[in-house]
C-alpha cells in the first residue's frame, strides 16, 4: 500500500537549499495523487539541517484542502527500522470529506515519528515504523453532521442539527421498526472510550410529546453512537478524543493524536 508519506522524506537525504523546494513540490504532487477532488490542494514544507545525513529531520508540515478520501492513507509498520526520525510532524487538513463525513478542519502536531532510514537512503522510499504522540483536533459543522446522519442512518428521512452551549439538538422524522414519527433529541455529547461520540443526558420528544422509556431508548439505540471514528471514518486510533466542545454551530473534538499501526487487513 502507498501511504501519504511515500517520497516525503526520501528526497531529503543528501539535498539542501533549492533542491528542498523541488522535493517539496514533488512530494505535494505525490500526496495529491492519493486524494480525490478537482479542487484539491496540497502543500509540503520540510525543515532540514545537516542532521538529515543520518536520518534526523527537524520537521515536516503537510497542508491539504478541498479533497475527498476513503479511510486513512497513513500508517506505521512496526517491523521496519527505526533509525530515522522526524522530530515534528504537522498536519493541517481543511474542507475535506473523510468517508461520508465532511470535515471543516483537522490538525495534528505529532512529535518523534520514526522511519526506515536504510530504506530511505538506499531506495528513496519512506515507511514510518513508529509514531510518537501529540495533540490533534477535528472541527465539524452542524450542517455537515446533518448530511452525515442522513447518509449513515437510513431510518432517518429528514433531519436538522443545531449545536450550541455544549448541547446538540436533533430534529427530524424517522421510520423505525415499530413506528414512524417526528422526533426531537436534546442532548450532550461524550466520548467514553475516546473513539465514539455518544448522546448523553438526552431529552427525547416524539410528535411533540415526551417519549416513554421504551420509545426513547429505541430512538437513542438507532442514533448512537453518532460518530464512530474507526467504523465510520477508518481513523484506527489516529485521535483519542478526551475533550468535546459544542459552540456556535461547530463540534470540536480534541485529544491525543498519533499515526496508527497498519491494520492486519486492508
Image (spheres, rainbow, N blue to C red):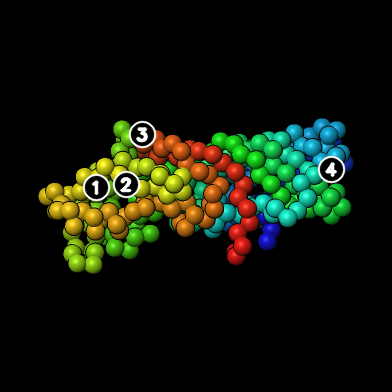
* Circle count: 4
> In which image quadrant can residue 203 be found?
top left
Q: Is residue 119 left or right of residue 181?
A: right
Q: How far is disc 4 from disc 2 in space, using C-alphas?
A: 49 Å
On residue 199, which mark appears? 2
> In which image quadrant can residue 62 be found?
top right
The kind of secondary structure element at disc 1 is strand
Q: Callout 2: few (<14), some (14-19), or many (20+) C-alpha neighbours within 10 Å?
A: many
Callout 2 touching callout 1 (CB < 8 Å): yes
Residue 251 position within the rendered picture, expressed as x and y whole percent measured from the top left? 40, 40
Q: Classify 113 as above or below 230.
A: above
Q: Is residue 169 left or right of residue 39?
A: left
Callout 4 touching callout 2 (CB < 8 Å): no
At 39% from the left and 35% from the top, the residue drawn is 245
Residue hosting label 4 = 13
The kind of secondary structure element at disc 4 is loop
Residue hosting label 3 = 247
Q: How far is disc 1 from disc 4 in space, using C-alphas?
A: 55 Å
Query: Of the residues tagged 3 and 2, which is closer to the observer?
Result: 2
On residue 104, which mark appears? none
Residue hosting label 1 = 185
Whichever of callouts 3 and 2 sits on the residue coming sooner in the sequence is 2
Quadrant of the rendering where the N terminus is positioned:
bottom right
Whichever of callouts 1 and 4 sits on the residue coming sooner in the sequence is 4
Whichever of callouts 1 and 3 sits on the residue coming sooner in the sequence is 1
Whichever of callouts 2 and 1 sits on the residue coming sooner in the sequence is 1
Q: Callout 1: few (<14), some (14-19), or many (20+) C-alpha neighbours within 10 Å?
A: many
Query: Of the residues tagged 2 and 1, which is closer to the observer?
Result: 2
Residue 26 shows in this picture: no
Residue 261 position within the rendered picture, expressed as x and y whole percent measured from the top left? 63, 53
At 55% from the left and 57% from the top, the residue drawn is 71
Amino acid at each position: 500500500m502507498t501511504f501519504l508519506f511515500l517520497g516525503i522524506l526520501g528526497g531529503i537525504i543528501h539535498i539542501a537549499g533549492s533542491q528542498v523546494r523541488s522535493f517539496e513540490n514533488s512530494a505535494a504532487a505525490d500526496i495529491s495523487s492519493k486524494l480525490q477532488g478537482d479542487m484539491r490542494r496540497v502543500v509540503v514544507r520540510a525543515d532540514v539541517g545537516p542532521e538529515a545525513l543520518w536520518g534526523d529531520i527537524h520537521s515536516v508540515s503537510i497542508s491539504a484542502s478541498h479533497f475527498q478520501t476513503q479511510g486513512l492513507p497513513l500508517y506505521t509498520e512496526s517491523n521496519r527500522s527505526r533509525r530515522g526520525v522526524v522530530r515534528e510532524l504537522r498536519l493541517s487538513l481543511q474542507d475535506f470529506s473523510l468517508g461520508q463525513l465532511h470535515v471543516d478542519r483537522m490538525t495534528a502536531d505529532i512529535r518523534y515519528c520514526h522511519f526506515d532510514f536504510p530504506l530511505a537512503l538506499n531506495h528513496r522510499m519512506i515507511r514510518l515504523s513508529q509514531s510518537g504522540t501529540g495533540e490533534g483536533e477535528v472541527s465539524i459543522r452542524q450542517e455537515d453532521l446533518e448530511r452525515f446522519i442522513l447518509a449513515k442512518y437510513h431510518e432517518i428521512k429528514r433531519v436538522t442539527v443545531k449545536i450550541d452551549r455544549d448541547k446538540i439538538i436533533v430534529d427530524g422524522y424517522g421510520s423505525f421498526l415499530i413506528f414512524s414519527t417526528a422526533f426531537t433529541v436534546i442532548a450532550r455529547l461524550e466520548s467514553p472510550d475516546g473513539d465514539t461520540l455518544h448522546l448523553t443526558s438526552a431529552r427525547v420528544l416524539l410528535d411533540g410529546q415526551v417519549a416513554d422509556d421504551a420509545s426513547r431508548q429505541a430512538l437513542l439505540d438507532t442514533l448512537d453512537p453518532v460518530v464512530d471514528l474507526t467504523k465510520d471514518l477508518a481513523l484506527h486510533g489516529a485521535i483519542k478524543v478526551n475533550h468535546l466542545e459544542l459552540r456556535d454551530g461547530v463540534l470540536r473534538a480534541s485529544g491525543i493524536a498519533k499515526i496508527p499501526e497498519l491494520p492486519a487487513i486492508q
